[in-house]
Amino acid sequence: MKLTLLVQLSWRNLWRHRRRTVILLTTICFAVGSVLVFNALLRGMQVSMAETAIDNLNGHFKVLAPGYLDDPGIEKSFEFEPIGRPELAGDAIQGWAPRVRVPAVIRSERETRGVQFVGVVPGSEEISFLGDVAIDGEYLSGPDDRRILVGQALAQQLETGVGRRVVLITQGVDGGNRESGYRIAGVYDAVGEGIEKAFVFTGLATVQELLSVDAVTEVSVRLAEDDQNPSVLNSLTSTFSDLDVRTWQDLEPQAAMMYEMADTTVAIWFLIVMGALIFGIVNTLVTAVMERVRELGMLRAIGMRRGAVIAQVVIESMLTMTIGISIGVVLGTLSYLWLADGIDLSAFAEGLEMTGVKPELVPRLWARDVFLVVGLSLVLGILASIYPAQRAVKVQPLDAMRG
Amino acid sequence: MNRTLSCLAAGMLVLSTAAADAEDLTAEELVSGALDLMRGATSHVELTMKIKRPDWERSTSVVSWSQGREDTLIRFTAPAKDAGNALLKVGDNMWTYTPRLNRTIRLPYSMRAQSWGGSDFSYNDLSRSDQVLRHYDLAILDKRQDGEHTIYTIEAVPHENAPVVWGKEIWVLRDDYVMLEQVFYDQLQVALKRMTTLEIGSMGGRTLATRMRMERLDESDHWTEVVTDSAEFDIELPERMFTLFTLKEAT
């Protein structure tokens, strides 16, 4: 039997009960649309989380002295020549930033707090959040700038501000105390008070001078593309063979876990929605088959093959799914476009800061995800038609026509 | 910034030697002269410290020994609750000892801005010695005659990179090196703390401030008064005076 004829038959069957089909189509539309929107939101959150983790002085990779992570201090440092760029595949690297980061105590006239004192090369920090953070006052002018940048939350705690002096105290390589006064060049407003309270920045040479070292404690490497290329990691590991090369997932295990969890959440949501939908489709198809017992019996009697009967039901299911999915994808994409400017979550900002999600959520709809959803839905459509098709095949021509 | 070390720890020893010719004194000479005189000596001082807060006040007795400009041992002797709590400063390091816990703790820098023994003095106040000379620019703002003495008002402004949080300090010194007043300003030039000499007396063969009060200017009824009950200078101190061993020893 010709396929076109079967499709034609199925198509006609579909529109015999116009209202029923429309309701089913609507259900499919909403299911697919909602899965796509939900997926875009979660992807947005995922990207934002990863970006925050990478921005927060981690980079995609970070080179550290062995043991620094367990017990950070200037004695765990290494020499780094910025000229000695590791031989890496083409333009895989967007940039890298050497830093000296040591635990320190900051004092104002009224308060004392524990912080991380970070010496940076200001020009290299476009790879971290420092590159585009909002600053009240001035950014550091160069690696030998003797002024500092403090976070807004820290400045409030210390009751200090731009242009005023604070004292930083830390430990030198010999274990002795090093202290010096620094003037505040600017107050930065980062995503998350945790960051603002944790980091005080100044020029790299300034911290090196305070600690009498030439070394750095870390080098962050940022890739041009978010997809981590294992060859870059290999290349870094062999370039810095006696050092510790870590990925951002190593450095921010919590963010990495949340990142992984988003994938699972999308899958679970898809299964719940589509699972419910399958029962709707099965039910509708079975009803349609039962209504046509006589007709199916007749068709079998005049010589339609079992395969053709099965194909008819499957095609009917696929037609419904294809139409429903198409409209659903259009609807989902439209909703995504409507939200694409970002959703303002600042009302929940405090809770979100914990997870490192920025207060503005920009959804991401990836073609990869759309294809996956469409493909899986079609597969589910076929699966849903198995049972109704079986029912249709079981129809005995004699019984059917007698009944 | 030598203020409290000189007052409490080093024992408020300000020489009553005839003041140098008042006309010739510069700010540096006034300050360093006073410091130099205090440094060379050893001291043994007994003090009463009175802490006042809006809803309570209490009085404690303290004994202190000092040697040179770096070494100090301070111990509470009364009331019983506080007796034995002690503080040792040797060079740049400080330790505290609490007999009830039988623990000696080396004070990290992060804790040195905290109040010492509940008073209006911080550990930092006790630990600075010659900081004023190293980290401040000194200038005489005012000079006036008060009876037989000349009173100097000195402004001390910390250097740009000095490890000092204050905006400036104003010292009022008499020409025989008795400090009359010391005021600490924040960087907006708002006065935060003030130490005032309330009584000047003769003790241990020297003329010195015998009653001083450190008060918080941003909160009312918030002050600590230190009264010198007895003082001896240039005495023999046992060699092991400034050790962790002595710190734990209730003498």
Image (spheres, rainbow, N blue to C red):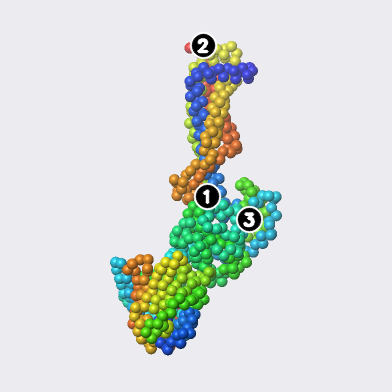
SS at circle 2: helix
On whether disc 1 and disc 3 are found on a single subunit, the reply is: yes
Q: Nearer the viewer, residue A328 or A314?
A: A328
Residue that label 1 marks: A255
SS at circle 1: helix
Look at discs 2 and 3 and give the one toward the viewer: 3
Residue A264 placed where, x, y %? 52, 41
| Residue drawn 42% across the image and 88% down it | B17
Residue that label 2 marks: A401
**Chain identity of mark 2:** A
Residue A51 placed where, x, y %? 56, 49
Q: Amino acid at mark 3?
A: Trp
SS at circle 3: strand
Q: In which quadrant of the rendered view does residue A8 lie?
A: top right
Residue A205 placed where, x, y %? 60, 65
Question: Label 1 to label 3, Cα distance in Å?
Answer: 21 Å
In the drawing, does residue A262 fall left or right of residue B45? Answer: right
Look at discs 1 and 2 and give the one toward the viewer: 1
| B17 up-or-down from B59: above or below | below
In the rendered image, is residue B3 in sight?
A: no
In the drawing, does residue A196 fall left or right of residue A8? Answer: left
Q: Amino acid at mark 2?
A: Met
Residue that label 3 marks: A96
Q: Amino acid at mark 1?
A: Ala
Which tag, 1 or 2, sits closer to the chain's start? 1
Q: Residues within 10 Å of mark 1 (few under 14, many from 20)?
A: many
Question: Label 1 to label 2, Cα distance in Å?
Answer: 65 Å
In the rendered image, is residue A138 in sight?
A: yes
**Chain identity of mark 3:** A
| Residue drawn 50% across the image and 77% down it | B133
